[in-house]
């Protein structure tokens, strides 16, 4: 059971650091059930001092669900899966601060949930640090389960039965119009999801929202965008945010159904490389509760 693992809180309201686990040793029957129980209960897990190579990283992600392979999704054919770098390092060295590559990384500095613009949203992101800068570059998390539970009644009433539309280029347009118009940002059709996602294990509701969110069905453009902004701001009040300053070997795992996250700036002349795998939700993760039939 989950209590067999030693944990300490990351934040008073959500998240735990898990101690004494080598993630390379996790299998479906060994440690994963305990980790999954902690994941369902606490929404964010930190493991320090890890050494996840691409194969180990991939095996761990496969335990949570199907690997998210955006290249295969967009092309409609089999494309070999690769672990995704979140990095300003390129084959030509560190990318310029004003490059589209770095501007896209800055899009991740808006509060978001991964993959809400895809046919299947993400269940989990498993992120590990390979290269860290001398300062900055934190990843911040906020619980939309806590945000929903603490939200004022009038805001809850407007969101409770809402359908929210998501578009990748919406978040990128906040950074750069040129970035937002790239084919990689516009290839996905607009995607609607119900706003409230009940956890199928413990029944606790969370709010599914992101910087990709651009409209609330049935509301006018300005009214819907204002509500989205107000809800994100409420969920991410400073006292409800966990900020993680990376060390090489750290692994953060969070529940995309119940967590907003964002990156923070760093000196862009310095390299910063994290490696990320998202796994997609399955029916057993409560997909039917948010899917629009």
Image: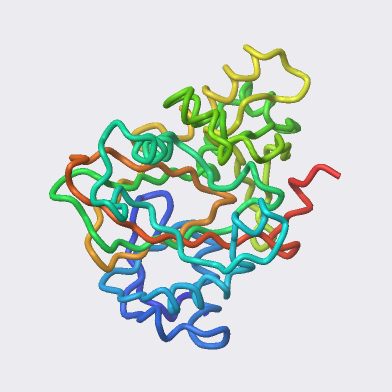
Return the residue found at the far right: 293
Tell me where residue 220 appears, x and y as whole percent.
71, 13
- Residue farthest to the left? 134
Q: Picture coordinates of residue 253 (x, y %)?
A: 44, 61
Left or right: residue 286 versus residue 232 is right
* Residue at point 37%, 76% (across, down): 53
- Residue 273, by quadrant, is bottom left
Q: Name the residue: 35% across, 81% down.
A: 22
Q: For residue 202, what is the image quadrant?
A: bottom right
Image quadrant for the C terminus? top right
Image height of 23 relative to 77, above or below: below
In the displayed structure, 212 sits above or below 243; it is above
Q: In the image, residue 258 lies at what x, y percent?
A: 55, 49
Residue placed most toward the observer, 224 or 71: 71
Question: Which residue does the image show at 68% across and 37% down from the upper left?
Answer: 195
Which residue reaches farthest front?
A: 92
Residue 225 image position (x, y, % from top left)? 60, 19
Instruction: Report the front residue among 175 and 244.
Output: 175
In this rendering, the answer to whether 87 lies above or below 156 is: below
Residue under the point 26% across and 35% down: 97
């Amino acid at each position: 059971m989950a209590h067999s693992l030693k944990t300490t809180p990351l934040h008073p309201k959500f998240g735990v650091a898990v101690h004494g686990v080598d993630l390379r040793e996790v299998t479906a029957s060994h440690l994963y059930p305990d980790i999954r129980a902690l994941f369902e209960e606490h929404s964010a897990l930190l493991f320090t001092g890890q050494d996840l190579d691409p194969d180990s990283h991939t095996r761990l992600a496969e335990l949570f669900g199907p690997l998210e392979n955006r290249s295969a999704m967009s092309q409609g054919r089999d494309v070999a899966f690769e672990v995704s770098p979140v990095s300003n390092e390129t084959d030509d060295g560190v990318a310029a601060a004003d490059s589209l590559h770095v501007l896209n990384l800055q899009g991740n500095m808006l509060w978001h949930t991964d993959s809400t613009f895809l046919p299947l949203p993400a269940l989990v992101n498993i992120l590990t640090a390979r290269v860290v800068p001398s300062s900055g570059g934190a990843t911040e998390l906020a619980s939309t389960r806590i945000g929903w539970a603490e939200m004022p009644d009038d805001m809850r009433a407007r969101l409770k039965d809402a359908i929210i539309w998501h578009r990748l280029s919406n978040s990128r347009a906040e950074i750069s119009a040129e970035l937002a118009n790239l084919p990689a940002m516009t290839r996905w059709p607009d995607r609607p999801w119900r706003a409230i996602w009940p956890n199928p294990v413990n029944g606790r509701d969370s709010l599914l929202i992101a910087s990709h969110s651009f409209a609330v069905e049935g509301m006018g453009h300005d009214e819907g965008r204002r509500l989205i902004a107000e809800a994100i701001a409420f969920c991410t009040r400073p006292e409800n945010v966990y900020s993680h300053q990376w060390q090489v070997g750290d692994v953060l795992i969070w529940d995309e159904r119940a967590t907003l996250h964002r990156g923070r700036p760093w000196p862009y002349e310095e390299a910063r490389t994290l490696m990320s795998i998202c796994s997609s939700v399955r029916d057993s993760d409560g997909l039917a509760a948010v899917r629009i039939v």
